Image (cartoon, rainbow, N blue to C red):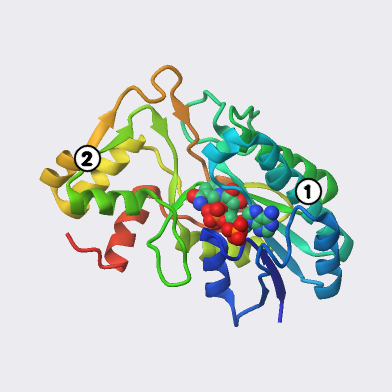
Amino acid sequence: MTKILVTGGSGFVGSRIVKRWSGVYEILAPQHHEMDITDAAAVKQYCRAHKPDVIVHTAAISNTGYCEEHPEESLLVNATAAIGLAEAAAEIGAKFIFFSSDQIYNGNTEQGLLYEDIDVAPVNHYGRHKLLAEQGIMELLPDAVLLRATWMYDLPAEGLPAHPNFITNLLNAASTGQPLRFATHEHRGITDVGEVVEYLPKTFELPGGVYNYGSENELNTYETALRFVKDWQGEETANAIVVPDTERFGQQPRNISISTDKITALSLGEIAFTDTLEGLKRFVRENRLSK
Ligand SMILES: NC(=O)c1ccc[n+]([C@@H]2O[C@H](COP(=O)([O-])OP(=O)(O)OC[C@H]3O[C@@H](n4cnc5c(N)ncnc54)[C@H](OP(=O)(O)O)[C@@H]3O)[C@@H](O)[C@H]2O)c1
Protein backbone atom coordinates (compact mmCIF):
# COMPACT_ATOMS: atom_id res chain seq x y z
CA MET A 1 0.00 0.00 0.00
CA THR A 2 1.37 3.43 -0.90
CA LYS A 3 2.40 5.28 2.25
CA ILE A 4 1.54 8.97 2.37
CA LEU A 5 2.72 11.52 4.90
CA VAL A 6 0.20 14.35 5.21
CA THR A 7 1.37 17.43 7.10
CA GLY A 8 -1.31 19.73 8.50
CA GLY A 9 -3.64 16.75 9.02
CA SER A 10 -5.71 18.70 11.56
CA GLY A 11 -6.25 21.62 9.16
CA PHE A 12 -9.09 22.37 6.75
CA VAL A 13 -7.59 20.60 3.73
CA GLY A 14 -5.39 18.07 5.53
CA SER A 15 -8.20 16.66 7.70
CA ARG A 16 -10.31 16.01 4.60
CA ILE A 17 -7.40 14.33 2.81
CA VAL A 18 -6.83 12.09 5.81
CA LYS A 19 -10.53 11.18 6.07
CA ARG A 20 -11.03 10.52 2.35
CA TRP A 21 -7.90 8.50 1.66
CA SER A 22 -7.37 6.53 4.91
CA GLY A 23 -7.70 2.84 4.11
CA VAL A 24 -7.03 3.37 0.41
CA TYR A 25 -3.51 4.51 1.28
CA GLU A 26 -1.50 4.11 4.44
CA ILE A 27 -1.78 7.61 5.82
CA LEU A 28 0.64 9.09 8.33
CA ALA A 29 -0.59 12.37 9.76
CA PRO A 30 1.51 13.53 12.71
CA GLN A 31 -0.05 16.41 14.60
CA HIS A 32 1.79 19.72 15.05
CA HIS A 33 3.05 18.67 18.52
CA GLU A 34 4.26 15.32 17.14
CA MET A 35 6.24 16.81 14.24
CA ASP A 36 6.82 20.55 14.17
CA ILE A 37 7.69 21.30 10.55
CA THR A 38 9.97 24.15 11.62
CA ASP A 39 12.22 21.60 13.34
CA ALA A 40 14.20 20.38 10.32
CA ALA A 41 16.03 17.67 12.27
CA ALA A 42 12.77 16.26 13.64
CA VAL A 43 11.24 16.28 10.14
CA LYS A 44 14.22 14.39 8.68
CA GLN A 45 14.18 11.93 11.56
CA TYR A 46 10.45 11.28 11.07
CA CYS A 47 10.87 10.78 7.33
CA ARG A 48 13.85 8.44 7.72
CA ALA A 49 11.95 6.38 10.29
CA HIS A 50 8.70 6.10 8.29
CA LYS A 51 9.88 6.37 4.65
CA PRO A 52 6.65 7.60 3.05
CA ASP A 53 6.34 7.16 -0.74
CA VAL A 54 4.60 10.53 -1.05
CA ILE A 55 4.65 13.64 1.14
CA VAL A 56 1.60 15.91 0.83
CA HIS A 57 2.55 19.15 2.50
CA THR A 58 -0.50 21.16 3.54
CA ALA A 59 0.76 22.52 6.88
CA ALA A 60 1.10 26.29 6.78
CA ILE A 61 0.02 29.52 8.34
CA SER A 62 -2.87 30.01 5.96
CA ASN A 63 -4.31 33.23 7.37
CA THR A 64 -2.99 36.01 5.14
CA GLY A 65 -3.80 38.75 7.68
CA TYR A 66 -1.86 36.92 10.39
CA CYS A 67 1.10 36.53 7.99
CA GLU A 68 1.05 40.28 7.30
CA GLU A 69 1.38 40.93 11.03
CA HIS A 70 3.89 38.14 11.71
CA PRO A 71 6.18 38.09 8.65
CA GLU A 72 9.04 36.23 10.36
CA GLU A 73 6.76 33.42 11.49
CA SER A 74 5.21 33.27 8.03
CA LEU A 75 8.65 33.08 6.41
CA LEU A 76 9.71 30.30 8.76
CA VAL A 77 6.57 28.14 8.44
CA ASN A 78 5.45 28.90 4.89
CA ALA A 79 8.84 29.01 3.16
CA THR A 80 11.80 27.71 5.22
CA ALA A 81 9.94 24.73 6.69
CA ALA A 82 8.41 23.82 3.30
CA ILE A 83 11.89 23.75 1.78
CA GLY A 84 13.09 21.66 4.74
CA LEU A 85 10.37 19.12 4.02
CA ALA A 86 11.41 19.01 0.38
CA GLU A 87 14.97 18.29 1.53
CA ALA A 88 13.69 15.39 3.62
CA ALA A 89 11.64 14.13 0.64
CA ALA A 90 14.74 14.29 -1.59
CA GLU A 91 16.74 12.31 0.93
CA ILE A 92 14.25 9.41 1.09
CA GLY A 93 13.17 9.62 -2.59
CA ALA A 94 9.53 10.53 -1.83
CA LYS A 95 7.29 12.33 -4.33
CA PHE A 96 6.63 15.80 -2.92
CA ILE A 97 3.26 17.54 -3.32
CA PHE A 98 3.13 21.10 -2.01
CA PHE A 99 0.04 23.22 -1.41
CA SER A 100 0.88 26.66 -2.72
CA SER A 101 -1.67 29.39 -3.42
CA ASP A 102 -3.29 31.56 -6.07
CA GLN A 103 -2.15 34.49 -3.88
CA ILE A 104 1.13 34.14 -5.79
CA TYR A 105 -0.69 36.14 -8.52
CA ASN A 106 -1.93 38.96 -6.29
CA GLY A 107 0.55 41.49 -7.72
CA ASN A 108 -0.33 40.76 -11.34
CA THR A 109 -2.32 43.17 -13.47
CA GLU A 110 -3.20 40.94 -16.44
CA GLN A 111 -6.86 40.28 -17.18
CA GLY A 112 -8.45 36.93 -17.90
CA LEU A 113 -7.47 33.53 -16.58
CA LEU A 114 -3.83 33.36 -15.45
CA TYR A 115 -1.32 30.72 -16.53
CA GLU A 116 1.50 29.26 -14.47
CA ASP A 117 4.33 30.65 -16.63
CA ILE A 118 3.61 34.38 -16.26
CA ASP A 119 5.99 36.55 -14.20
CA VAL A 120 4.67 37.04 -10.69
CA ALA A 121 5.42 39.54 -7.91
CA PRO A 122 3.09 38.94 -4.94
CA VAL A 123 2.25 41.99 -2.84
CA ASN A 124 1.79 40.40 0.58
CA HIS A 125 4.01 38.30 2.84
CA TYR A 126 1.90 35.16 2.45
CA GLY A 127 2.15 35.27 -1.36
CA ARG A 128 5.86 36.14 -1.29
CA HIS A 129 6.63 33.32 1.13
CA LYS A 130 4.67 30.77 -0.91
CA LEU A 131 6.67 31.90 -3.94
CA LEU A 132 9.97 31.56 -2.04
CA ALA A 133 8.88 28.06 -1.04
CA GLU A 134 8.04 27.14 -4.64
CA GLN A 135 11.43 28.37 -5.85
CA GLY A 136 13.37 26.61 -3.09
CA ILE A 137 11.50 23.35 -3.56
CA MET A 138 11.96 23.32 -7.35
CA GLU A 139 15.71 23.88 -6.99
CA LEU A 140 16.02 20.87 -4.69
CA LEU A 141 13.42 18.62 -6.23
CA PRO A 142 12.50 19.27 -9.88
CA ASP A 143 10.11 16.31 -9.64
CA ALA A 144 7.98 18.07 -6.98
CA VAL A 145 4.38 19.03 -7.80
CA LEU A 146 3.42 22.50 -6.61
CA LEU A 147 -0.32 23.13 -6.48
CA ARG A 148 -1.50 26.74 -6.58
CA ALA A 149 -4.81 26.28 -4.76
CA THR A 150 -7.68 28.76 -4.78
CA TRP A 151 -9.98 29.80 -1.93
CA MET A 152 -11.81 26.62 -0.89
CA TYR A 153 -15.12 25.96 0.83
CA ASP A 154 -16.99 23.28 2.75
CA LEU A 155 -19.30 22.97 5.71
CA PRO A 156 -17.82 22.15 9.10
CA ALA A 157 -18.41 18.57 10.24
CA GLU A 158 -17.25 16.38 13.11
CA GLY A 159 -13.46 16.22 13.02
CA LEU A 160 -13.42 18.41 9.90
CA PRO A 161 -12.75 22.06 10.71
CA ALA A 162 -13.79 24.86 8.36
CA HIS A 163 -12.72 28.43 8.76
CA PRO A 164 -15.19 31.03 7.41
CA ASN A 165 -15.51 30.49 3.67
CA PHE A 166 -17.68 31.52 0.73
CA ILE A 167 -20.42 28.98 1.52
CA THR A 168 -20.49 29.37 5.31
CA ASN A 169 -20.49 33.18 4.96
CA LEU A 170 -23.45 33.06 2.58
CA LEU A 171 -25.36 30.48 4.65
CA ASN A 172 -24.94 32.76 7.61
CA ALA A 173 -26.15 35.78 5.66
CA ALA A 174 -29.15 33.88 4.28
CA SER A 175 -30.23 32.76 7.75
CA THR A 176 -29.74 36.11 9.49
CA GLY A 177 -30.67 38.38 6.56
CA GLN A 178 -27.44 40.29 7.25
CA PRO A 179 -26.12 41.63 3.90
CA LEU A 180 -22.61 40.78 2.74
CA ARG A 181 -20.40 42.93 0.52
CA PHE A 182 -18.56 41.33 -2.40
CA ALA A 183 -15.87 43.07 -4.44
CA THR A 184 -16.73 43.96 -8.02
CA HIS A 185 -13.04 44.59 -8.78
CA GLU A 186 -11.87 41.13 -7.78
CA HIS A 187 -11.66 37.98 -9.88
CA ARG A 188 -10.75 34.69 -8.22
CA GLY A 189 -11.54 31.01 -8.42
CA ILE A 190 -13.48 29.52 -5.51
CA THR A 191 -13.36 25.74 -5.17
CA ASP A 192 -15.19 22.89 -3.44
CA VAL A 193 -12.48 21.33 -1.25
CA GLY A 194 -14.05 17.93 -2.01
CA GLU A 195 -12.81 18.22 -5.60
CA VAL A 196 -9.34 19.25 -4.43
CA VAL A 197 -9.17 16.17 -2.21
CA GLU A 198 -10.66 13.80 -4.79
CA TYR A 199 -8.13 14.68 -7.49
CA LEU A 200 -5.15 14.60 -5.14
CA PRO A 201 -3.85 11.06 -5.91
CA LYS A 202 -3.81 11.91 -9.61
CA THR A 203 -1.32 14.68 -8.85
CA PHE A 204 1.18 12.03 -7.68
CA GLU A 205 1.58 10.98 -11.32
CA LEU A 206 2.22 14.47 -12.68
CA PRO A 207 5.64 15.57 -13.91
CA GLY A 208 7.36 18.04 -11.60
CA GLY A 209 6.33 21.68 -11.88
CA VAL A 210 3.86 24.35 -10.87
CA TYR A 211 0.16 23.75 -11.47
CA ASN A 212 -2.90 25.90 -10.92
CA TYR A 213 -5.22 23.67 -8.91
CA GLY A 214 -8.89 24.60 -8.45
CA SER A 215 -11.93 26.01 -10.20
CA GLU A 216 -11.71 28.54 -12.96
CA ASN A 217 -13.96 31.60 -12.70
CA GLU A 218 -14.54 34.27 -15.34
CA LEU A 219 -16.96 36.24 -13.10
CA ASN A 220 -16.02 38.84 -10.54
CA THR A 221 -16.63 37.92 -6.89
CA TYR A 222 -19.83 40.00 -6.63
CA GLU A 223 -21.32 38.46 -9.78
CA THR A 224 -20.35 35.01 -8.57
CA ALA A 225 -22.16 35.49 -5.26
CA LEU A 226 -25.20 37.16 -6.85
CA ARG A 227 -25.72 34.49 -9.53
CA PHE A 228 -25.15 31.70 -7.05
CA VAL A 229 -27.62 33.03 -4.44
CA LYS A 230 -30.22 33.80 -7.16
CA ASP A 231 -30.07 30.19 -8.27
CA TRP A 232 -30.12 28.82 -4.73
CA GLN A 233 -32.38 31.22 -2.78
CA GLY A 234 -34.17 33.25 -5.44
CA GLU A 235 -33.80 36.80 -6.72
CA GLU A 236 -35.28 38.60 -3.73
CA THR A 237 -32.88 37.04 -1.21
CA ALA A 238 -29.95 37.47 -3.59
CA ASN A 239 -30.60 41.19 -3.95
CA ALA A 240 -31.07 41.56 -0.20
CA ILE A 241 -27.93 39.80 1.02
CA VAL A 242 -25.43 40.20 -1.85
CA VAL A 243 -24.24 43.81 -1.96
CA PRO A 244 -21.66 45.16 -4.44
CA ASP A 245 -18.46 46.56 -2.95
CA THR A 246 -17.07 48.84 -5.65
CA GLU A 247 -14.37 50.37 -3.43
CA ARG A 248 -12.33 47.31 -2.50
CA PHE A 249 -9.53 46.88 -5.07
CA GLY A 250 -10.98 49.95 -6.85
CA GLN A 251 -7.54 51.56 -7.24
CA GLN A 252 -5.89 48.35 -8.41
CA PRO A 253 -8.31 45.66 -9.60
CA ARG A 254 -7.31 42.22 -8.32
CA ASN A 255 -7.29 39.25 -10.63
CA ILE A 256 -5.99 35.96 -9.25
CA SER A 257 -8.31 33.81 -11.34
CA ILE A 258 -6.51 30.72 -12.59
CA SER A 259 -6.52 28.73 -15.81
CA THR A 260 -6.37 24.97 -15.30
CA ASP A 261 -5.50 24.11 -18.90
CA LYS A 262 -2.04 22.84 -17.89
CA ILE A 263 -3.11 20.38 -15.21
CA THR A 264 -6.01 19.09 -17.30
CA ALA A 265 -3.70 18.55 -20.30
CA LEU A 266 -0.85 16.92 -18.36
CA SER A 267 -3.23 14.64 -16.44
CA LEU A 268 -4.73 13.63 -19.81
CA GLY A 269 -8.09 15.03 -18.74
CA GLU A 270 -8.21 13.14 -15.43
CA ILE A 271 -8.03 16.35 -13.40
CA ALA A 272 -10.80 18.61 -14.66
CA PHE A 273 -12.19 21.01 -12.07
CA THR A 274 -15.78 22.22 -12.26
CA ASP A 275 -16.09 25.94 -12.94
CA THR A 276 -16.71 28.00 -9.76
CA LEU A 277 -20.42 28.77 -10.27
CA GLU A 278 -21.27 25.22 -11.38
CA GLY A 279 -19.29 23.84 -8.42
CA LEU A 280 -21.24 26.00 -5.98
CA LYS A 281 -24.59 24.95 -7.47
CA ARG A 282 -23.60 21.29 -7.29
CA PHE A 283 -22.41 21.69 -3.69
CA VAL A 284 -25.80 23.06 -2.64
CA ARG A 285 -27.62 20.19 -4.40
CA GLU A 286 -25.35 17.48 -3.03
CA ASN A 287 -25.52 18.83 0.51
CA ARG A 288 -29.27 19.48 0.23
CA LEU A 289 -28.88 23.02 1.54
CA SER A 290 -32.43 24.24 1.82
CA LYS A 291 -33.76 27.46 0.36
N1 LIG B 1 -8.01 27.14 2.81
C1 LIG B 1 -7.89 27.77 1.65
O1 LIG B 1 -8.88 28.30 1.10
C2 LIG B 1 -6.53 27.83 0.94
C3 LIG B 1 -6.43 28.52 -0.28
C4 LIG B 1 -5.22 28.49 -0.98
C5 LIG B 1 -4.14 27.79 -0.45
N2 LIG B 1 -4.25 27.16 0.75
C6 LIG B 1 -3.09 26.41 1.25
O2 LIG B 1 -3.50 25.06 1.42
C7 LIG B 1 -2.85 24.50 2.55
C8 LIG B 1 -3.89 23.98 3.53
O3 LIG B 1 -4.67 25.08 4.01
P1 LIG B 1 -5.71 24.92 5.19
O4 LIG B 1 -6.83 25.85 4.93
O5 LIG B 1 -5.98 23.48 5.42
O6 LIG B 1 -4.87 25.49 6.42
P2 LIG B 1 -5.29 25.42 7.95
O7 LIG B 1 -6.69 24.96 8.12
O8 LIG B 1 -4.91 26.74 8.53
O9 LIG B 1 -4.35 24.28 8.56
C9 LIG B 1 -2.98 24.47 8.69
C10 LIG B 1 -2.39 23.23 9.32
O10 LIG B 1 -0.98 23.42 9.45
C11 LIG B 1 -0.60 23.00 10.74
N3 LIG B 1 0.62 23.70 11.16
C12 LIG B 1 0.83 25.03 11.25
N4 LIG B 1 2.07 25.29 11.67
C13 LIG B 1 2.67 24.08 11.86
C14 LIG B 1 3.96 23.68 12.30
N5 LIG B 1 4.91 24.57 12.63
N6 LIG B 1 4.24 22.34 12.36
C15 LIG B 1 3.30 21.42 12.05
N7 LIG B 1 2.06 21.74 11.63
C16 LIG B 1 1.75 23.06 11.54
C17 LIG B 1 -1.79 23.33 11.63
O11 LIG B 1 -1.74 22.60 12.82
P3 LIG B 1 -2.19 23.32 14.20
O12 LIG B 1 -3.55 23.91 13.93
O13 LIG B 1 -2.19 22.22 15.21
O14 LIG B 1 -1.17 24.37 14.45
C18 LIG B 1 -2.93 22.87 10.70
O15 LIG B 1 -3.09 21.47 10.80
C19 LIG B 1 -1.95 25.60 3.11
O16 LIG B 1 -0.66 25.45 2.60
C20 LIG B 1 -2.59 26.87 2.61
O17 LIG B 1 -1.63 27.90 2.52
C21 LIG B 1 -5.42 27.14 1.45
Q: Is residue 252 above or below residue 264?
A: above
Q: Quadrant of residue 186?
A: top left
Residue at point 24% right, 44% down? 227
Q: Are marks 2 and 1 in contact (CB under 8 Å)?
A: no
- Amino acid identity at mark 2: Pro
What secondary structure is found at the residue carrying circle 1? Answer: helix
Q: Which residue in the protein does label 2 denote? A: 179
Residue 269's tag is none
Q: Which of 79 and 38 lies nearest the eye of the viewer?
A: 38
Q: Which residue in the protein does label 1 denote? A: 83
Quadrant location of the C terminus in the rendered image: bottom left
Q: Quadrant of residue 247?
A: top left
Residue at point 86% right, 69% down? 48
Mark 2 Cβ inside 8 Å of ligand 1: no
What's the CA distance linking mark 2 and mark 1?
42 Å
Question: Which quadrant does ligand 1 occupy?
Answer: bottom right
Where is residue 159 shown, x and y percent of the image?
48, 71
- Amino acid identity at mark 1: Ile
Where is residue 54 shown, x and y percent of the image?
73, 66
